[in-house]
Each structure stands twice: as C-alpha cells, then as structure tokens.
Image (cartoon, rainbow, N blue to C red):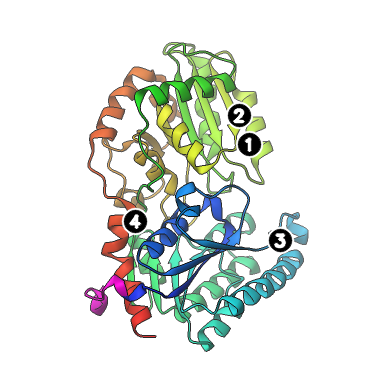
Amino acid sequence: MGDHDSAPIEKLVGRRVAVVVLADLARSPRMLGHALELRRAGASVTLVGLMEGELPRVVTESGTRTRLLTDRRTRESPGLYAFKAASDLAKTSVQLGAQLRDLRPDLVLVQSPPSQHLLPWIFESKRRGARLAVDWHNLGSSRSALRFGATHPIPRALALSERALSRLADAQVAVSSRLLSAVSVVGVPSVVLHDRPMSWYRRSSISARESKRTEILATFDAKDDGGLLVVTSTSFGPDEDFELLEGAIRRLEAAGASAGKVRVLITGRGPGMDEILGKLTKACGSRAQVRNVWLSAEDLAETLSAADVGLSLHRSSSGLDLPMKIQDMVGAGLPVLALDFAPVLLETFRVGVDGLLFTSSAELCELLDRGRQFMSGLRKFAEAAPKVSWSEAWRASVGPLLGTLCSSR
C-alpha cells in the first residue's frame, strides 16, 4: 500500500463522497459496504445510481443519502444494440454530470464495470478538484466479449475506456489480486479488498431458520420431508453457467430418489430469466423442483440462513473476478457448492471449510445426491470457521487509502 499505510481514516471526516453505481444499488452490496464504512468514518456520503429493490435498513439508517438515475440500460436485440447503447450513454452521462455538479464531491468512488458512461464527467469532476477512486469488480470488456465476440468493436471500445479510467484514477481497489494486476498503473496507489460478508448477512437462530424454511417450502407447495433445499442468487447474466445445473437436474432425475427431493430456489431476475427458468423447469421431474423469487437484502439473508446449501454457478468472463454471492452465503453460515471456474477463486474460497468445488454437471449431481445430512456436516465447518468481516478488512486497507487521497486534496 505504500506511503498511505499510516494515513488516518480520520482524514475522511466531513469530506463529501459520491459513491457511483450504474446498476441497482440494492443489489450492489460491495458498494453499499463502502458507503457504510465511509459514513462510520465521518464522511458525508451520497449514493448515485439506479434503484430496483430496497436498500438494507442498516444503510438507510446510517444517514447515507441517495440520488437516483433513470434506468436507460440497453435491452434491445444485438442488431440495435450499438445505436441504442450510444444513445443511452449520452443520456446517462448528462444525468451523472448534473448530479455531480450539484454534489461537488471531494471524492468520487465508482464501481467498474460498468464504466463506459463515466469518462465524460470524470474529466469535469477532476477539473473541479475531486479525487477519483475506482473499485474494480471485473472487466466489462470481457463480459461484453461473451455476447459479441472478442473482435467486435463494442468489447474493444470498452477495453479502451477501461484503460482510460485506470489512468485517470487517483487510487484503485480490486476484488482480487489478479484483477488488480490487470488494471494497475505505475504510480497509482492501489489495494486488494476481497469480498467479505456484509453485516446484514448473519446466521439466524434455529427457530428463525425453521420458520423461514417452512415459508420457503410453501413456495414449492411442499412440507419439510427431509429433502435438500438449495439456494442461489443471480442476475441471469452470461457469466452464470446454468447449463451445469440443468445437466445436474437431468442426472438426478435419471438416478431416482436415492437421497430424497432436491429443491432449488433461485433468487434474482435479469434479461435471460424466462429462457433459463424454462429450461430448468423442463428438466425437472419427480425428484427436482425449481422456483424463482425476488427478495430484499434482509429477506435474502434470512433465506440463505434457512437453506441447506448455497450454489454458485459463476463462470468469470475474465478469470479475474470473484462472486460476491459466495461471501453472502458464508456470512449466513451456509456451506457453498461453487463452480471451480479459475485459480482466482482460491484467493478467498477455503475448500472443505466454506464448501466444496465442482467442475461439471456430473460432479454437481454427485454432491447434490449426497443429500441433507451430508450438507449438515459441511455446515458445521462453515459455521465454526473464523471470518474476517467487511468492516475489519476495509479499515485495514481501503480506509487508509481514501484517507490519504482526501488529505492530499
């Protein structure tokens, strides 16, 4: 971390900070975590972004303000995408510029991706004296390449904008060491902040878990018959490998009910939802069931705690990012079955402690087929394992970094 190691977090007291998320704020726990810690450090914090769900109560009660943008994200067919995306970029940039001119922040902390809307007003904010910190969650260019192909002009343009953003930044944060290496710029201070469980993801009491489990099973028109309750959260994007789950379900159905029912609750929504849910439902027979729900942050935390096992189907587009959902599950005391998509996963995932890994539908089927009693054994390890909280990790790394930025303004 260089010369900002000793910079006191107290330098953030009274500073105006804009935390910018060009996505649903309610589904951006990492950026909400930044906002909470900045507030606790004494900064005046405003969240700028979209709003589709409800913010966790701990955020709304912290004194954090919000400025909402109009949702103009492109959902058209690929043939119209380039034209509509350019139009949306211009409109969103105008909104962002207006908000930041009004807020006049000392520090702007932005999430990337998405970042293609950021450059026009970053120039203006920096001209006004604001410091810029970028929190890298992945590479938007790699995600775009999944849709259009690596040689398409859109992923190439996004790669250029990301390189420009990294060079404009006064400080950079990343979810993994490998991602930070990919975006780091000589002379720009940077830190790795691995995802950690947020404060609202906690283990529920046994009675609360049993009550919530009964409520969840009602979604399946079922009672507690000893079957396995699996939960996963998703935005139904291209970096989620639902084909593996579909294949595992087909294998479970072919194997018969050797270990009872397997019920999969999928929380979230997104542009590919209907097609994916249709395929999964079609694969189900007498043994497996799939349901989809949309939950608030608090309700999701309670749901995770009531399940038997969590499931991560994240397959990184870049091989550099880490799925936040795993830490959400770990924070709720839930063991996780995670797709082993790249070596970066082992920066935070403790095999045999946080859960187990799989690489194919056959391996996932085998794990699910072991049933509820096996998952209960895994849960004991997950609940007993020591955990570093988000707050502890933030105050040891990002807090001093941002304090240095503000003290040099």
Q: Quadrant of residue 2?
A: bottom left
Q: Nearer the viewer, mark 4 or mark 1?
A: 4
Evaluate if marks 3 and 1 touch, with contact meaning CB atoms under 8 Å apart: no
Residue 276 disc label:
1
Q: Earlier in the sequence, mark 2 or mark 4?
A: 4
Disc 1 crowd, CA 10 A, few/some/many (<14, 14-19, 20+): some
Mark 2, other Cα within 10 Å: few <14 / some 14–19 / many ≥20: many
378 lies left or right of 130: left
- Give the quarter of the image for residue 49: bottom right
Look at the picture and state if 78 lies above or below 271: below
| Sequence order check, earlier mark of 3 and 1 | 3
Do residues under tags 2 and 1 come within 8 Å of each other at their CB atoms? yes
Tag 4 residue: 194
150 or 63: which is nearer to us? 63
Q: Is residue 299 above or below residue 103?
A: above
* Magenta stretch contains residue 63: no
* Vertical relation: 193 (above or below) 348: below
Which residue position is annotated with label 3?
A: 72
Amino acid on which disc 2 is placed: Leu
Which residue is the site of mark 2? Answer: 280
Residue beneath the point at 41% across and 25% down? 209
Question: Is any part of residue 262 visible from this angle?
Answer: yes
Q: Secondary structure at mark 3?
A: loop
Residue 297 screen position, x and y as percent: 50, 43
N-terminal of the pair, mark 3 or mark 2, is 3
